[in-house]
């Protein structure tokens, strides 16, 4: 039996999942042979990319026209989710994820890393008070992530304990946090790729740059097919790696 049925859902049995994995392997090998036959031609075919919302909006989408100009025969489909996905169930060729990753049989390729910035809107600081020292942040309000909680922790050089800033609101999505601080709800710690343009345009200001203790955010691609066997995946990963600050 390959499927289990109920009145509300259908799911794969272990045997069905094994068969699906085997079928995926057959498809992968077939595509690899096709790519080998087309070695002298430009990469072509569909490529389904699953990535976090913020990464899609700030890194992939603004530059995808460039990729399309370079590889017009690669048809990219973008799926956005901040939660881990099963590549087989989601029909994705590659998933881009942040931070430390659990042990997995999936193939991995580090794409780069991006620093963190503690930021706020100038109008909010004009109203609430500009901090002179990291300790002064305790008088402000923080827009917090519901998860992972460690992003909300603010540690600074020279201070033994983190600075605790009262929360104004919480959100589970990085893009929602960014919108909230742009709207003057407080301060937040966000990755450089999300707020770099806002800082350059003056919409946000960085606070205590160089004093915030936070390891850069690792960005990794996860995939099932060996890159050597799928050229459209290889060129996409090569390209997207150039868009991330190392």
Image (cartoon, helix red, strand yellow):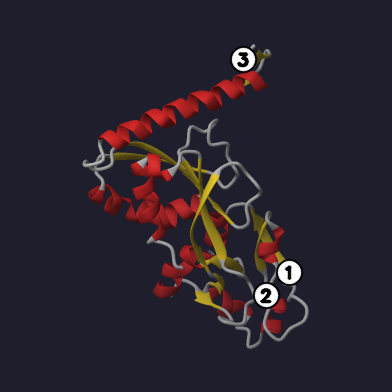
Q: Is residue 68 visible?
A: yes
> How crowded is the residue under tag 1: few (<14 C-alpha within 10 Å), some, or many (20+)?
some
Q: Is residue 122 visible?
A: no
As measured in the structure, the alpha-carbon distance from the residue carrying label 2 to the one carrying label 3 is: 56 Å
Residue position marked by numbered label 2 in the rendering? 140
In this picture, residue 41 sits left or right of residue 217: left
Question: Residue 9: x percent and y percent?
Answer: 64, 19
Q: Residue at x 68, y 72 (%)?
A: 154
As measured in the structure, the alpha-carbon distance from the residue carrying label 3 to the one carrying label 1 is: 52 Å
Residue position marked by numbered label 1 in the rendering? 166
> Against 198, is 223 above or below?
above
Residue position marked by numbered label 3 in the rendering? 2
Question: Residue 48: x percent and y percent?
Answer: 42, 38
Residue 23 got which mark?
Answer: none
> Against 23, is 164 above or below?
below
Q: Residue at x 41, y 74 (%)?
A: 200
As measured in the structure, the alpha-carbon distance from the residue carrying label 2 to the one carrying label 1 is: 7 Å
**Residue situated in front as seen by the camera: 227 or 111:** 227
> Mark 2 vs mark 3: which is more N-terminal?
3
Q: Quadrant of residue 162?
A: bottom right
**Residue situated in front as seen by the camera: 2 or 55:** 2
> Mark 2 vs mark 1: which is more N-terminal?
2
Tell me whether circle 2 and circle 3 mark residues in contact (CB < 8 Å). Answer: no
Q: Residue at x 33, y 51 (%)?
A: 64
Secondary structure beneath label 1: loop
Tell me whether circle 2 and circle 1 mark residues in contact (CB < 8 Å). Answer: yes
In this picture, residue 230 sits left or right of residue 192: left
Name of the residue lying farthest toward the right: 161
> How crowded is the residue under tag 2: few (<14 C-alpha within 10 Å), some, or many (20+)?
many
Question: Residue 87: x percent and y percent?
Answer: 53, 36
């Amino acid at each position: 039996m390959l499927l289990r049925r109920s009145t509300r859902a259908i799911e794969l049995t272990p045997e069905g999942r094994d068969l699906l994995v085997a079928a995926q392997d057959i498809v992968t090998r077939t595509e690899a042979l096709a790519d080998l036959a087309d070695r002298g031609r430009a990469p072509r075919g569909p490529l389904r990319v699953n990535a976090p919302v913020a990464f899609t909006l700030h890194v992939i989408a603004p530059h995808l026209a460039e990729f399309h100009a370079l590889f017009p025969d690669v048809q990219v489909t973008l799926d956005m989710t901040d939660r881990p996905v099963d590549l087989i169930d989601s029909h994705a060729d590659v998933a881009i994820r942040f931070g430390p990753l659990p042990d997995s049989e999936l193939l991995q390729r580090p794409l780069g890393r991006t620093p963190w910035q503690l930021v706020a809107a100038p109008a909010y600081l004009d109203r609430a008070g500009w901090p002179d020292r990291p300790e002064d942040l305790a008088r402000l309000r923080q827009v917090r992530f519901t998860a992972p909680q460690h992003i909300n922790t603010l540690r600074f050089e020279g201070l033994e304990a983190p600075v605790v800033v009262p929360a104004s609101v919480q959100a589970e999505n990085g893009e929602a946090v960014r919108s909230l601080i742009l709207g003057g709800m407080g301060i937040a710690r966000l990755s450089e790729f999300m707020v770099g343009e806002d800082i350059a345009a003056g919409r946000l200001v960085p606070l205590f740059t160089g004093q915030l203790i936070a390891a850069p955010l690792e960005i990794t691609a996860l995939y099932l097919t060996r890159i050597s066997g799928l050229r459209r995946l290889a060129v996409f990963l090569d390209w997207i790696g150039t868009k991330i600050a190392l």
